[in-house]
Image (tube, coloured by chain):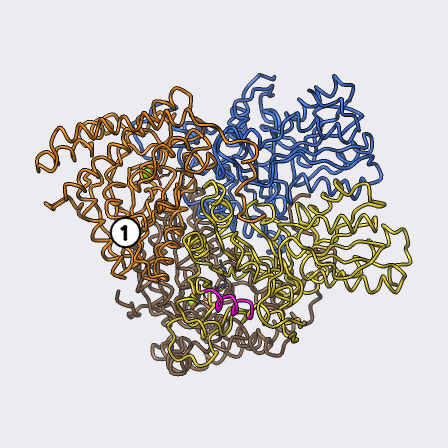
Chain colours: A orange, B yellow, C brown, D blue
């Protein structure tokens, strides 16, 4: 399958700036979490999205609050691209009462249903059926919404991939399945674990379109997502988009990443950075000025600093929260 | 007005009323309509579920709201979780509770935990109907009673009705409850007849029903075993022992007070539960009473359960597997200290 | 995908007779069970294989006792084709102590590991991982054995299909996945539940060969299975074979089969019978004489009668069997 | 000769010895070797499991016997069932016990029932190692202790070790047992150090270990909670109360006699189990004693468990979620009837 690259298309200035800002927010958020984590301040398992920004942003650029996404254990990027509040996100990762989930979910369960973000998920493959359910509601209630399911190359071998896509296909649901193929599931290479050459090749098994996209090219992702979302909104059913990407950090914080080769790491961190590339694109195409971009970068840096402050100054939940919200009733 | 209808008809009526009342109620599962895309089906020729419990619903509500699914329990049960969280009120049928092995994640890690993990910012008004129970000669993978697994998991509500009237009221309560509910239907009760009120009514969760009053002995029984307990109680009465038979109806939440009050009166407890014994609901209720009701107790707490083995196929063995009135009588004799209670 | 039909090939006379006999055994066994069940004598759920004989027999004709098969809820045919004892089978279906599983399994769990028959299975899709496990043993112990996984069109949408085939593919295990596409899962048509046109189309998702075969043509099945099993024995990994077939009876005994059309039923029962077809083939190609075939038919009829007698005269298991064999130890 | 090594090292050693002893022992699971097909890995750079418990095994035994798997729990756990039934002796790692949702069918309906359904004509010498336990800030889907679910299911054996020495002996016993065993490893115990004998030894199933003797009170505790119980017992001793601390080590089979004998002596029982309370092992042991040990009891049976909620992420809440020595002391004070026992 050929890897789709961006063709010249017209991004509005507004959309372009939004996209650059979201990519910056994700990168800076994750770099910050990485830094704080390494100081031993943050609890739990943290999986960082840095390096994959183009995927979440390129897709979510088409969505509104009425659209849904399901996410993964590596969910911060999806959250930000779906316009969740970064203060609430950071506080959640700190386990504070002001967190998006009042500190009960943490990094792996961060969610904001009011934004259509149906949750990060600690279960690999957990998102497939969940996206189908949101798509089912959209179809039956005729809301015009779509549901996007982000998932990893590792998840693509889980049974829920098969069940979820088949269901969406036979019911022609407005669901877009977005594979984030970053080459590894923990320390296991995609090529070892998957019998398919491309994840998108598997679309044929469900009679739906499958497309491979350069996941470092936010415009390419944007274009592929556009086609798929239009199809979905037109009642033509699901699409499978595979974005070839890379995670800049380890599987989780603390991973020595011995399975990555030096060359590969260097290539991705130095040559293939999605943000650098998009920045150049914006300048070359005169969608943004150097100053505008610098302003975005700085305002994002401030926002992230503020998020950390907010989180650090927030209170922890207290004993009465322990048994609250297990049920709506009783 | 009450009429005499079957357990199965009572369930069907509950779903029909719920779907009439609220257009967000949908039903999905394998063959719940039946014959999807088959165009020569006439009248009520569509299956309506493997046991016919949902028969006719597709005729009234159409295939948009009564959805046949592929054999993909993780897929459609998981879909029902977010369908619920995003504005529908799904009834998902898991044909046999034994198939929970194919979708436990969606029930345990998604449905049950979603609200809590999201800090209360979502609800999951999902009802999973499922068949359980031995006695149907359906062997090890189609005969289990797995409500203990679900009762162990916080975030789920667990309902096990024993009569047509309870089945209807509890199913309506389940459908309109805003939390995920697992609703157990004993396949050997479907043909049981009973008085059922017409129209819409709900039976609240967490309220046990005292199916028979008595001062000498408390028998708590689950689902079909309520009838085993009642049979035993009738024989006990002939021997001068008045047993109180309590049907918890919902295992989560559990009506602790009714059980404890009864034991406060009788001083003796037998729990009848056809599930396997270890970490069972029988054990759970025993533990409750051994703590909060200890001072009332005059005798050991007895559990009549299945033995710790899979359900055997052979009728000869399956009959030995299930609780019987005789087993209850034997336990009663032991804790009352009167061997004459056991029939010869 | 084109449906492979039999080309002229040379069956030995011995093999041909074995195949005809097994097909007869299956048909007569099932017809007999149907008859006894309708008299209300037999307990439980019974799913009959009549109509699909060519699949089990065409595949198992290549196997020895050292090869494994996994089966389904519709398992009698696989059992017979794998040379399980019909007396023990019938007794099992009656729930007798002399049954293959001592009456504890019944129709849905009938098994004989000593014959390589790893069990019927009450769980749709249950067989995929189990076949992979037998293939793993074969590969690691270098026994030269293969494992065949029989499964239905309904099972093809279960998550275990995906996980099982992917595993067999990446590990290049000697496993053959044989779809028995009889058009329905209970009352649900294949076309409704499956987003693929052919089950075999899904092979591409695992980079393995996929083949559609006329499942009423035992020679076509035999040939396809031969190719796949050779591949497997040569260490080239799994194959997916889809046999288009039909079940003559309902999903289970008691099913009114309203979802089948009259024409369809007539076509299959009258024109497309696999046994009738194979019988003609044997005569035309002079592999068997009319007399030989009649002798087989009669001897099978006798054997089935004997099996019923055996089952009916056998004792039920008794109380001490209830707790026996839950564990090897304790 | 005993050395002091970690819980994790003890487990690693057990697997190493098992694989040396019997070439049919294989290990499979996600990243149990790590970096499959990556050719630049040096020395012990391969992960060896997400927590490094299986580190180095692939170097000694090769990738034929230490198999990385895709994220397909139903697939590879199911494969391990028949690999076991056809002549191997697999150790399958289910990374977190919470992932049982993806493969319960293979464990409950296949592994556990195969032998019984086949009339005893097969065996399943399979060990499933899995991580459990709260306290790691791993939140609701990575912190559960689900051994009650497995204990409920006949056909499975359930092991929960509390010390490095027990871990090694019990894991070796599991691997060489001919039945399916679910072996629970508390992720917060991996770094715990303890004396462990060199060489091959097994600890038989169904034999509880009395971790501390005492005449006044019996505390039965599971896994890591054995240490909570021991801490409570040490404080109790200062207050003149001698608690007996019993570690069942295997929940199925359960050593009923040791528990009952202890209660016969002490008359009082507390069960400490960090799992959710309903239908738990704590309830199971309570029920056992409320029946067979009723006549020994001088006081209600207390259970110290998690509350009936998912595991919260926030450290502030997770610390409140888990049992503590103080909670045990409070229960002890109550059933001994001496409030001075609780520290102020
Ligand atoms: C069902 C399940 N199995 C295993 C895990 C452990 N686990 C967490 S993330 C991960 C790797 C996921 O890989 P991939 O899908 O490629 O996502 P990535 O981490 O690369 O973003 C694994 C195995 C899990 N959380 N859930
Ligand atoms: C996991 C699971 N889900 C549902 C069922 C109920 N069930 C038994 S057979 C069957 C249909 C199977 O269809 P197919 O795979 O096509 O096999 P066929 O009956 O046509 O041979 C269903 C839904 C089951 N036994 N297991
Ligand atoms: Mg990945
Ligand atoms: Mg079929």
| Marked residue chain, label 1 | A
Q: Position of residue C19 (x, y in %)?
A: 43, 69
Question: Residue A40: percent from the left, percent from the top?
Answer: 42, 21
- Using the rendered view, name the quadrant where residue D156 is placed: top right
Instruction: Find numbered disc 1 in the image and state the secondary structure of the residue it sits on.
Output: strand
Residue at 45 percent across and 38 percent down: it is D28
In the rendered image, is residue D81 in sight?
A: no
Mark 1: few/some/many CA within 10 Å (<14, 14-19, 20+): many
Left or right: residue B163 compared with residue D263 = left
Residue closer to the observer: D213 or D266 = D266
- Overall secondary structure of the magenta section: helix
Query: Which quarter of the picture shows residue B137?
Result: bottom right
Magenta segment boundaries in residue numbering: B13-22
Whether residue B99 is situated above or below residue D272 in the rendered picture: below
Left of A15 or right of it: where is B94?
right
In the rendered view, would you say B260 is above or below B160? Answer: above
Residue corresponding to mark 1: A240
Q: Which one is nearer the viewer's eye here, C161 or B177?
A: B177
Residue B288 within the magenta-colored segment of the rendering: no
Residue D280: x percent and y percent?
64, 42
Q: Is residue D166 visible?
A: yes
């Amino acid at each position: 399958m050929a890897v789709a690259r961006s063709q010249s298309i017209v991004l509005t200035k507004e959309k372009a700036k939004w996209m650059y800002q979201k990519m910056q927010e994700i990168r800076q958020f994750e770099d910050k979490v990485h830094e704080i984590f390494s100081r031993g301040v943050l609890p739990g398992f943290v999986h960082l999205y840095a390096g994959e920004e183009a995927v979440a942003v390129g897709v979510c650029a088409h969505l509104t609050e009425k659209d849904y996404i399901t996410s993964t254990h590596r969910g911060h990027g999806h959250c930000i691209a779906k316009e969740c509040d970064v203060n609430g996100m950071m506080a959640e990762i700190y386990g504070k009462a002001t967190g998006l989930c009042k500190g009960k979910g943490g990094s792996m369960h961060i969610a904001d249903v009011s934004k259509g973000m149906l949750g990060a998920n600690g279960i690999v493959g957990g998102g497939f059926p969940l996206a189908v359910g949101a798509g089912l509601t959209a179809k039956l209630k005729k809301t015009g919404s779509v549901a996007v399911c982000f998932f990893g190359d590792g998840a693509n071998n889980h049974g829920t991939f098969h069940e979820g896509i088949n269901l969406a296909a036979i019911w022609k649901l407005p669901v877009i399945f977005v594979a984030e193929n970053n080459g590894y599931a923990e320390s296991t290479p995609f090529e070892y674990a998957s019998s398919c050459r491309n994840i998108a090749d598997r679309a044929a098994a469900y009679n739906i379109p499958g497309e491979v996209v350069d996941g470092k090219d936010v415009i390419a992702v944007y274009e592929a997502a556009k086609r798929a979302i239009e199809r979905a909104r037109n009642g033509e059913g699901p699409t499978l988009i595979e974005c070839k990407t890379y995670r800049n950090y380890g599987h989780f914080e603390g991973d020595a990443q011995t399975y990555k080769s030096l060359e590969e790491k260097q290539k991705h961190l130095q040559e293939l950075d999605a943000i650098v590339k998009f920045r150049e694109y914006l300048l070359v195409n005169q969608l943004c000025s150097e100053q505008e971009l610098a302003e975005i970068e700085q305002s994002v840096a401030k926002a992230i600093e503020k998020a950390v402050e907010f989180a650090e100054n927030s209170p922890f939940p207290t004993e009465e929260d322990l048994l609250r919200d297990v049920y709506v009733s009783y | 007005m009450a009429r005499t209808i079957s357990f199965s008809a009572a369930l069907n009526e509950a779903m029909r009323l719920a779907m009439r009342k609220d257009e967000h109620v949908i039903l999905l599962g394998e063959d719940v309509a039946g014959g999807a895309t088959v165009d020569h089906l006439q009248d009520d020729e569509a299956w309506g579920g493997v046991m016919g419990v949902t028969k006719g619903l597709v005729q009234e509500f159409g295939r948009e709201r009564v959805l046949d699914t592929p054999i993909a329990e993780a897929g459609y049960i998981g879909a029902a979780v977010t369908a619920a969280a995003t504005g529908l009120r799904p009834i998902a049928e898991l044909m046999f509770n034994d198939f929970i092995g194919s979708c436990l994640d969606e029930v345990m890690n998604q449905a049950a935990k979603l609200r809590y993990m999201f800090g209360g910012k979502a609800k999951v008004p999902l009802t999973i109907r499922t068949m359980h129970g031995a006695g149907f000669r359906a062997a090890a993978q189609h005969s289990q009673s797995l409500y203990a697994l679900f009762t162990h998991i916080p975030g789920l509500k667990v309902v096990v009705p024993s009569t047509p009237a309870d089945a209807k009221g509890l199913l309506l309560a389940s459908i309109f409850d805003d939390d995920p509910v697992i609703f157990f239907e004993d396949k050997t009760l479907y043909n049981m007849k009973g008085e059922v009120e017409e129209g819409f009514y709900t039976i609240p969760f967490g309220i046990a029903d005292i199916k028979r009053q008595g001062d000498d002995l408390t028998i708590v029984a689950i689902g079909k075993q309520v009838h085993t307990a009642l049979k035993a109680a009738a024989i006990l009465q002939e021997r001068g022992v008045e047993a109180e038979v309590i049907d918890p109806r919902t295992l989560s939440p559990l009506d602790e007070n009714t059980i404890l009050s009864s034991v406060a009166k009788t001083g003796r407890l037998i729990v009848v539960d056809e599930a396997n014994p270890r970490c069972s609901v029988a054990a759970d209720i025993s533990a409750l009473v051994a703590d909060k009701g200890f001072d009332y107790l005059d005798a050991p707490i007895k559990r009549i359960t299945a033995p710790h083995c899979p359900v055997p196929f052979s009728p000869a063995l399956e009959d030995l597997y299930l609780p019987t009135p005789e087993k209850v009588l034997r336990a009663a004799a032991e804790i009352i200290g009167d061997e004459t209670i056991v029939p010869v």
